[in-house]
Image: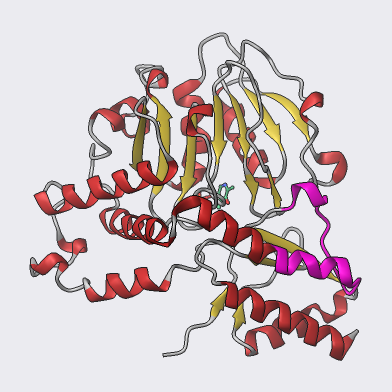
């Protein structure tokens, strides 16, 4: 069976061993004679699967005991609304950093429930860098500060956790969670849609510090209240059982390959192969400031945009798929999530050099 190299920004490439294992267990999980998809979410079997997934994530990320892990639905986009619903204190402001399109969406959603203080925006650079920390106009009394650790569309990534004092830090890690070690104790809330670096779409992982639970107003719908979800172990209603199961397998795959330190090393190497190209040729160009370049999503343009269609057609024919840039920015984008093998990136770079040789 031939598989393509999938450079999609999301849903993205999955680890092949996970797909194979899921295939082998599809009709009968653990010899029980039924698929995980067919199990009651209240069954002992599924409760074990969910507990194993949570333990796997906790161990990989080193999540401290004062944090709850929630397996929710609605994507990162629902978190744009749930974060202010759950954390905005009456009379206090909320701080947001604007580094691109995903930050902007989070800001727009927060604006529906009250004022938003945008501490800094990267608009002046057309969102190609992270505004220097010294320039952020933070409110020391803010309910929280929200930022996006990796702007999936712009290809701008934090390579460290910003210092914001005692204000709870809230982070949309949708496209770089599990791409390397992170000190969870620095955060109030971390959230991520699963379909980039965790597993199937339909699952949203939320990691929340326990003291931030129970702040939502009484009028908050139960499904949207972190405290309700935490109290019911993410089973207030039927959770996305299949997606939780696959996520658990991805966590085991990461553990077995050496954990987040090892995947970070591999990710840096993979991204380096592509970024190195921009140093040796002007045929391709990456707009992002060198220090803020994303290891997960590499946007680039061709010197001659008239070659874009040919580039994409020939790449597709060579088995390199989904390299078209986001519709809002054009050009190309190569997403190099955890599950993209180094050989896939080598094939991409070889194709790019060959294309330049023939068209440069
Ligand atoms: C994909 C993405 C989102 C949106 O995720 P959904 O799960 O589709 O709601 C939000 N933020 C970032 C950084 C993303 O990459």
| Quadrant placement of the N terminus | bottom left
Image location of residue 275, percent across then percent down: 76, 64
Residue toward you, 162 or 239:
162
Q: Which image quadrant for residue 207?
A: top left
Quadrant (top left, top right, bottom left, bottom right) of the C terminus: bottom right
Q: Residue at x 17, y 67 (%)?
A: 35
Q: In this view, does 198 lie above or below 335?
A: above
Residue beneath the point at 39% across and 30% down:
64
Tell me, yes or no, if residue 341 can be seen here.
yes
**Total numbered labels:** 0
* In-front residue for pair 209/327: 209
Report x, y in % for residue 32: 8, 66
With respect to residue 236, does 300 lie above or below?
below
Write the start and end of the magenta stretch as one range: 272-293
- Picture coordinates of residue 12, whole percent (x, y): 51, 65
The residue depicted at 54 percent of the width and 52 percent of the height is 179
Is 242 part of what is drawn in magenta?
Answer: no
Residue drawn at point x = 36 percent, y = 18 percent: 214
Q: Position of residue 327 (x, y in %)?
A: 70, 63
Question: With respect to residue 118, does 359 lie above or below?
Answer: below
The correct choice, above or below, for 279 with respect to 1 in the image is: above
* Residue 326 appears in the figure: no
Along the viewing direction, whichever of 251 and 142 lies nearer the viewer: 251
By what rule are the colours in the image chosen? secondary structure
């Amino acid at each position: 069976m031939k598989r393509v190299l999938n450079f999609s920004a999301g849903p993205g490439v999955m680890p092949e061993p996970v797909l194979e294992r899921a295939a082998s267990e599809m009709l009968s999980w653990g010899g029980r004679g039924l698929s995980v998809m067919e199990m009651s979410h209240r069954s002992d079997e599924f409760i074990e699967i969910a507990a194993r997934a949570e333990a796997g994530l906790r161990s990989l990320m080193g999540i401290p005991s004062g944090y709850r892990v929630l397996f929710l639905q609605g994507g990162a986009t629902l978190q744009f609304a749930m974060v202010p619903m759950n954390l905005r204190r009456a009379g206090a402001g909320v701080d947001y950093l604007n580094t691109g399109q995903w930050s902007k969406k989070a800001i727009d959603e927060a604006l529906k429930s009250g004022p938003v203080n945008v501490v800094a925006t990267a608009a002046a650079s057309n969102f190609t860098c992270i505004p220097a920390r010294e320039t952020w106009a933070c409110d020391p009394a803010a309910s929280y500060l929200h930022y996006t650790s990796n702007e999936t569309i712009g290809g701008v990534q934090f390579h460290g956790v910003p210092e914001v004092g005692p204000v709870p830090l809230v982070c949309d890690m949708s496209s770089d969670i599990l791409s390397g070690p992170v000190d969870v104790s620095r955060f109030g809330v971390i959230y991520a849609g699963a379909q980039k670096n965790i597993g199937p779409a339909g699952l949203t992982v939320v990691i929340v510090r326990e003291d931030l639970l129970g702040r939502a107003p009484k009028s908050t719908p139960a499904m949207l209240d972190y405290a309700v979800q935490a109290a019911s172990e993410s089973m207030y209603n039927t959770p996305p059982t299949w997606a939780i199961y696959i996520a658990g397998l991805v966590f085991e795959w990461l553990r077995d390959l050496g954990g987040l330190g090892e995947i970070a090393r591999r990710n840096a190497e993979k991204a380096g192969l592509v970024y190195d190209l921009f140093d040796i040729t002007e045929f391709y160009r990456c707009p992002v400031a060198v220090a803020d370049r994303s290891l997960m999503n590499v946007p680039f343009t061709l010197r001659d945009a008239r070659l874009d269609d040919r580039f994409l057609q020939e790449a597709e024919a060579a088995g390199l798929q989904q390299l078209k840039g986001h519709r809002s920015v054009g050009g190309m984008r190569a997403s190099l999530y955890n599950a993209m093998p180094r050989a896939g990136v080598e094939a991409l770079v070889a194709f790019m050099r060959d294309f330049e040789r023939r068209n440069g």
